[in-house]
Image: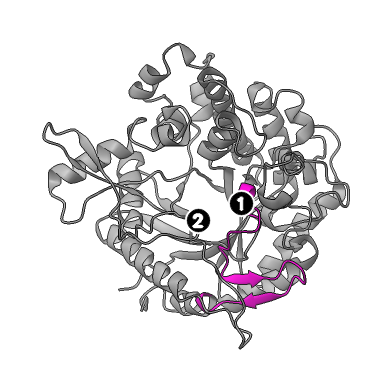
């Protein structure tokens, strides 16, 4: 069974994780540049200073994407590369880089899908309060305007923010990601409200100033709750309720407030213009200040709902009908990151999101970290990644057959890259990168994905 006609098959990456050139050509420091220099924060002191050197090797990398047959490339734009201090003077060389990248993609027949923010917040603005400062929403809108004025005659697909659950939850609550803060619930929700305002204001800028009609969405974590195998209707409903409850996720085990690791705390304001009632109750006195007009700004109409989905948690209906979490079986496969392999998360996650928000869904990230290396024959054999893709994409097919409007899939990632606090330990790429020589080697999964795209997913085996 093929995927829908005009389904978009893509690959993805993010600026800080692959670009390198961290202090070249006028780029300013980001919170990740600073975080990597704090002892013990990132594995073995790894940094994104060089990463995959994509800044200098983008032509080679676009050529690889073309070889694979990718129809679209989801990349992010580094805010401090474009505006080094976050506000004020624009760095012409930074904008030039993204213009050249977009032109190279278009010449290769690849659609550019631009993400405006993928965690590399300007350090200078962090020193002015960062996301805790309400002005951050206006700073982000001003930055968006600079990018839109330069690239929107060629870029038509846009995402505002990537995974607010992570850069607020891990960056501001647990301190395990940049900027490394350990704030209380009130401050985290306060910062999160400003993030949502930034999203809404960026959408307004795109609608008002894009040269070509803009297709606009965002890319939060898809926190997936799914029913147990052979589920009855009560189990399906229990999983749905868990997925859209602020207490249904794994926030407590991660050491963060329940609101932060949820779908609805972020998604409901964006789509419905209101925070979820159970989230308001959970926040209590920690609710952020909501000024007149805020929710109208946040809930600007978007064209698709993105979701980064890697795994999921099973639920069933308990004796009282309430959702009951079912632990993963001891035999459940694990990635090198120790994330459970749950292929049905791509069946139920997009379906539930589409049913709730009534928007087309794009799987903006999905992939697996494995312990890949170059074999003696010079090739990189990654049969487990191929098996993972077969299983997950079959799950996505099933969700589409169930009625979910899913319009695209982006494989994370095109290249092995800097995996945040894990440094270069985790390899997610379809392409192996030797970080000493910068040699790229296509893995077996890249060839498999090429065939998958060519058949529009009709040949998953």
> Viewed as shown, does residue 152 lie left or right of 331?
right
Query: Hey, which quadrant is residue 171 in on the image?
Result: top right
In the rendered view, would you say 26 is above or below 414? above
Position of residue 264 measured from the top left corner of the image (x, y, whole percent): 39, 33
Judging by the rendered image, the residue that carries numbered circle 2 is: 337
In the rendered view, would you say 172 is above or below 52? above
Q: Residue furthest bottom?
A: 377
**Residue 262, visible in the rendered structure:** no
> Viewed as shown, does residue 337 lie left or right of 201?
left
Position of residue 310 measured from the top left corner of the image (x, y, whole percent): 43, 54
Query: Hey, which quadrant is residue 192 in on the image?
Result: top right
Judging by the rendered image, the residue that carries numbered circle 1 is: 422
Q: What's the magenta region? A: 418-445
Q: Nearer the viewer, residue 354 or 49?
A: 49
Q: Residue at x 54, y 75 (%)?
A: 446
Give neighbour class at mark 1: few <14, some 14-19, many 20+ (Cα, 10 Å): some
Q: Residue furthest right?
A: 25
Instruction: Give yes or no for contact between labels 2 and 1 (Cβ–Cβ under 8 Å).
Output: yes
> Viewed as shown, does residue 28 lie left or right of 111?
right
């Amino acid at each position: 069974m093929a995927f829908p006609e005009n389904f978009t098959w893509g690959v993805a990456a993010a600026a800080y994780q692959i670009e390198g050139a961290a202090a070249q050509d006028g780029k300013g420091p980001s919170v990740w540049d600073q975080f990597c220099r704090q002892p013990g924060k990132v594995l073995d002191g790894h940094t994104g200073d060089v990463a995959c050197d994509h800044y200098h090797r983008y032509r080679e990398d676009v050529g690889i994407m073309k070889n694979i047959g990718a129809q679209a490339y989801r990349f992010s734009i580094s805010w401090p590369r474009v505006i080094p201090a976050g506000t004020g003077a624009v760095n012409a060389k930074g904008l030039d880089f993204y213009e050249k990248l977009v032109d190279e993609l278009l010449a290769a027949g690849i659609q550019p899908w631009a993400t405006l923010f993928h965690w590399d917040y300007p350090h200078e603005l962090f020193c002015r309060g960062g996301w805790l400062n309400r002005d951050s929403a206006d700073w982000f809108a001003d930055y968006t305007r600079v990018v839109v004025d330069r690239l929107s005659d060629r870029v038509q697909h846009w995402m505002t923010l990537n995974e607010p659950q992570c850069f607020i939850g891990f960056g501001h609550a647990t301190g395990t990601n940049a900027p490394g803060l350990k704030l209380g619930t009130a401050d985290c929700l306060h910062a999160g409200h400003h993030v949502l305002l930034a999203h809404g204001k960026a959408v307004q800028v795109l609608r008002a100033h894009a040269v070509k009609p803009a297709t606009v969405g965002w890319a939060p974590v898809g926190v997936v709750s799914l029913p147990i195998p052979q589920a009855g209707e009560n189990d399906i409903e229990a999983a749905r309720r868990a997925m859209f409850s602020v207490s249904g996720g794994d926030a407590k085990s991660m050491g963060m407030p329940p609101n932060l690791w949820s779908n609805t705390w972020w998604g409901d304001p964006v789509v419905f213009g209101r925070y979820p009632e159970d989230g308001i109750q959970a926040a209590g006195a920690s609710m952020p200040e909501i000024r007149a007009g805020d929710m109208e700004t946040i809930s600007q109409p978007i064209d698709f709902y993105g979701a980064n989905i890697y795994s999921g948690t099973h639920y069933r209906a308990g004796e009282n009908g309430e959702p009951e979490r079912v632990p993963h079986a001891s035999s459940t496969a694990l990635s090198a990151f120790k994330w459970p392999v749950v292929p049905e998360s791509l069946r139920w996650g997009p379906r539930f999101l589409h049913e709730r928000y009534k928007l087309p869904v794009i799987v903006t990230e999905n992939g697996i970290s494995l312990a890949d290396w170059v074999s003696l024959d010079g090739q990189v054999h990654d049969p487990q990644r191929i098996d993972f893709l077969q299983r997950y994409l079959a799950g996505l097919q099933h969700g589409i057959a169930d009625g979910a409007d899913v319009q695209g899939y982006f494989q994370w990632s095109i290249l092995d890259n800097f995996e945040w606090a894990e440094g270069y330990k985790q390899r997610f790429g379809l392409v192996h990168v030797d970080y000493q020589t910068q040699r790229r080697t296509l893995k077996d999964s890249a060839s498999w994905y090429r065939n998958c795209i060519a058949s529009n997913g009709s040949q998953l085996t």
